[in-house]
Amino acid sequence: MPLQGSMSVERMCQLAQVSRAGLYRSLQERTPVEEDMELRSAIQQIVLEHRRRFGYRRVSAELRRRGMLANHKRVARIMREDNLLAVQPRQFVATTDSHHELEVYLNLARRMKLTGIDQLWVADITYIRLRAEFVYLAVILDGFSRKVVGWAVERTLSSRLAIAALQQAIAKRQPRPGLIHHSDRGVQYASGEYVAILEQHQMIPSMSRPANPYDNASCESFIKTLKREEIYANAYENLEHLRANIAIFIE
């Protein structure tokens, strides 16, 4: 029974130094759910490493480079489900569908010279893997104090997640008009509902330049610290357990 091209089961057993029964048992131990989790984890890692600049074809190529085979249509489906597809700048073409495209805003944050709190907020999203599911953390940091002013954890990577963190920040800080809200170009921050809340509170949206991970450096630094000191040091039973621990860490 040949597997993986011309390599036989016997040769695979010889290379792995296991019996034929042991090989079949190890292959059967991985359930479809576990395989899907591994693939989603790898996709999340690649997308976040490259600041959402990779489309599904480049993600598929990177997966192959890492030794994971996945049909590009499956990769595209997963990225669409997890809202990982990049938002493209608006194309100024005369079509009746142009108002459906999400607008990408100029980077206003990189030239700011901060003198106090609530002049600049920086937002970002990361994923956290629990035992049997992914959950997503949205945070908003004050650019001057580097302290978290809003955060939220949800099971889905949707606009609702980012909005929950934003609403918490607004309720806590009651910022004056003119605050710059900076984020990457993710669909969560470019959505009409999110931008409407910014406009309602007279905040000015700002977005990172393409292919520039340094624009969100303060938020990324906090997320790395959170994962190193809290997430990786604990095994969470469920989402509620994670929420409680993150609240203690942040507050």
Image (cartoon, rainbow, N blue to C red):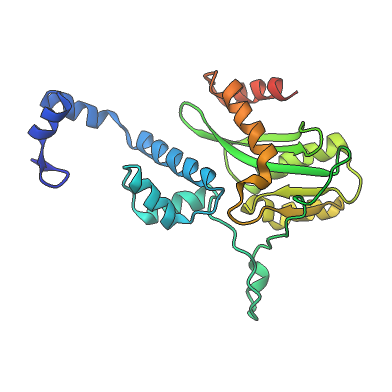
Which quarter of the picture shows residue 56? bottom left
Q: Position of residue 240 (x, y in %)?
A: 62, 24
The answer to whether one can see residue 138 in this image is: no
Which sits in the foreground, 213 or 238? 213
Q: Is residue 239 left or right of residue 196?
A: left
- Position of the N terminus, as image quadrant, is top left
Which sits in the foreground, 229 or 25? 229
Q: Determine whether 227 is above or below 57 in the image.
A: above
- Position of the C terminus, as image quadrant, is top right
Which sits in the foreground, 12 or 99? 12
Seen at 57% across and 41% down, the residue is 156
Q: Determine whether 190 is above or below 127 in the image.
A: below
- Furthest residue toward bottom: 94
Q: Position of residue 175 (x, y in %)?
A: 88, 42
Circle count: 0
The answer to whether one can see residue 107 in this image is: yes
Q: Position of residue 98 (x, y in %)?
A: 65, 73
